Image (cartoon, grey):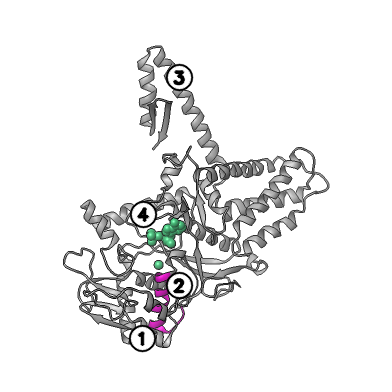
Amino acid sequence: MQLYKEQKLKITNSLTGKKERFKPINEGHIGMYVCGPTVYSNVHLGNCRTFMSFDMIFRYLRHLGYKVRFVRNITDAGHLVDDADEGEDKIAKKARLEKIEPMEVVQRYTVDFHKILEQFNFLPPSIEPTATGHIIEQLEIIKEILNKGYAYEVNGSVYFDVKKFSESFEYGKLSGRKLEDMITNTRELTAQSDKKSPQDFALWKKAEPQHIMRWPSPWGDGFPGWHLECTAMSTKYLGDTFDIHGGGMDLKFPHHECEIAQAEASNGLSPVNYWLHANMLTLNGKKMAKSTGNNILPGEIFSGENPILSKPFAPAVVRFFMMQAHYTSILDLSNDALLASEKGYHRLMDAFDNLGDLVTSGKSDFNVQEWQQKCYDAMNDDFNTPTLIAHLFEAVKHINLIKEGSESITLADKELLQQSMNSFIFDVLGLEGKSADYQDSDKLQAVVQLLIELRNEARSNKDFNTSDKIRDQLSAMGIQLKDGKEGTTFSVS
Ligand code: AMP
Ligand code: ZN
């Protein structure tokens, strides 16, 4: 029997604001869409947190036995610099500044995104479609919305008519905004704007002659509005109404609100049953963002090369740190928090490693079955990973007591504990297999430290052949030594 039949999952649905029992459209199958990155620069750790939250959700749904089609797109066109409908395309701007093709920008940062996700041990999505690969689908939706009378064309651009839409549908239901308040609170339109009303948003924008990312359309050369791509790609691969749509909280309005409006305007159907929003990673108490520079890159964490860090942290430690917070809570990054997570991660991994060697006996002091259900209850309660981790540490406590002989465990319980801990730690939380990565990194530190000492000895003996050989050969392996006032340090590239 599939686990999902006995483990009843509840998830917080942003559309209703309530924690609801999850019921997929087709039993045993789930369609899930998550807004992907705009690939105009390196992903920062904040972006990674949102994607990691949905990786954990994807993992748990699969663990429960669901067949999940997980679609996460790549935004490679249409996302403008001011997130509204004015300004340059983010990718085109980067291409102009670097004097390269927009698709070179896209390629570079898509590769970077994949590399980082692999380091964090993400599972690949089932489909990773791009906005530029779905221009035809986007044009078809615009035609449909125009046909239904919920959009208008002006000067080669097409805008969504929010007021007209609101006569038959509820615009603002996801973000809890009222159209009247939006009208009172928004700026007047600038003289050059083609929109009838400031709430309207672009479905298609006319490309000015200097705009390099352009496609032909019935309204002339242009490019799609940012919100449209997700409507096109989610409904193409998951159907007009699908189970789960996710993204960061900051996308709730306008991006997701507009996605709902576009889908409803084109076919009258509400596109998504459960909207899930992941909360922000902050740095110094402020949202991490590409645009403000208040961010930290995953590579800086892995190498330790950032002024806020006292040392490098392994990807699995960063993942553990993220999983210690609920995905709907704000999480602040600091060196102290990472150090604490590293300690906890090692304690958990050590206990898991020791579990195999525990001596069993005829009775158990630890009710493993009850404990296992508590772990499931935590995850069934809106993917509560911090509570799951607290239960894992309860198991760590018992493992340590059994190891020192103060408690005992039967063989059957030991096997169940091994199998459950393995599932929760590696399959669900996605922490790297075994503790190899941190042990490797500790071993590397020790070996390089030894070589630094040998090099120092050689230098003090004026044996520069040996000292240069150590430095150059390490450098050839990608390990750079840096001599400073405080002694020699190293970095790995
Ligand atoms: P973008 O590449 O800007 O389109 O963002 C990609 C994803 O990262 C979106 O789901 C955003 O909501 C999310 N995101 C952006 N900043 C943060 C942050 N500081 N913390 C968590 N998620 C974020
Ligand atoms: Zn999206």
Query: For residue 160, what is the image quadrant?
Result: bottom left
| Residue 442 sits above or below residue 88 on the image | above
Q: Tell whether 173 sits left or right of 209.
A: right
From the top left corner, tell me how far across and down residue 3 is, in percent: 65, 65
Q: Residue at x 39, y 55 (%)?
A: 289
Tag nearer the camera, 3 or 1: 1
The image quadrant where one finds the C terminus is top left
Mark 1 is on which residue type?
Lys
Mark 3 is on which residue type?
Leu
Q: Earlier in the sequence, mark 1 or mark 4?
A: 1
Query: For residue 358, what is the image quadrant?
Result: top right
From the top left corner, tell me how far across and down residue 269 is, in percent: 45, 82
Judged from the image, the secondary structure of the residue bearing numbered disc 4 is loop
Region of the chain picked out in magenta, as a range: 253-270
Q: Give the residue at mark 2.
A: 238
Judged from the image, the secondary structure of the residue bearing numbered disc 2 is helix
How far apart are labels 3 and 2 at the CA level? 60 Å
Q: Give the residue at mark 1.
A: 164
Mark 4 is on which residue type?
Thr
Q: Earlier in the sequence, mark 3 or mark 4?
A: 4
Q: Earlier in the sequence, mark 2 or mark 4?
A: 2
How far apart are labels 1 and 2 at the CA level? 28 Å
Q: Residue at x 74, y 39 (%)?
A: 403
Mark 3 in CB contact with mark 1 (< 8 angstroms) = no
Mark 2 is on which residue type?
Leu
Tag nearer the camera, 2 or 4: 4
Q: Earlier in the sequence, mark 1 or mark 2?
A: 1
How far apart are labels 1 and 4 at the CA level? 36 Å
Query: For residue 384, what is the image quadrant?
Result: bottom right
Mark 1 in CB contact with mark 4 (< 8 angstroms) = no
Q: Give the residue at mark 3.
A: 454
Judged from the image, the secondary structure of the residue bearing numbered disc 1 is helix
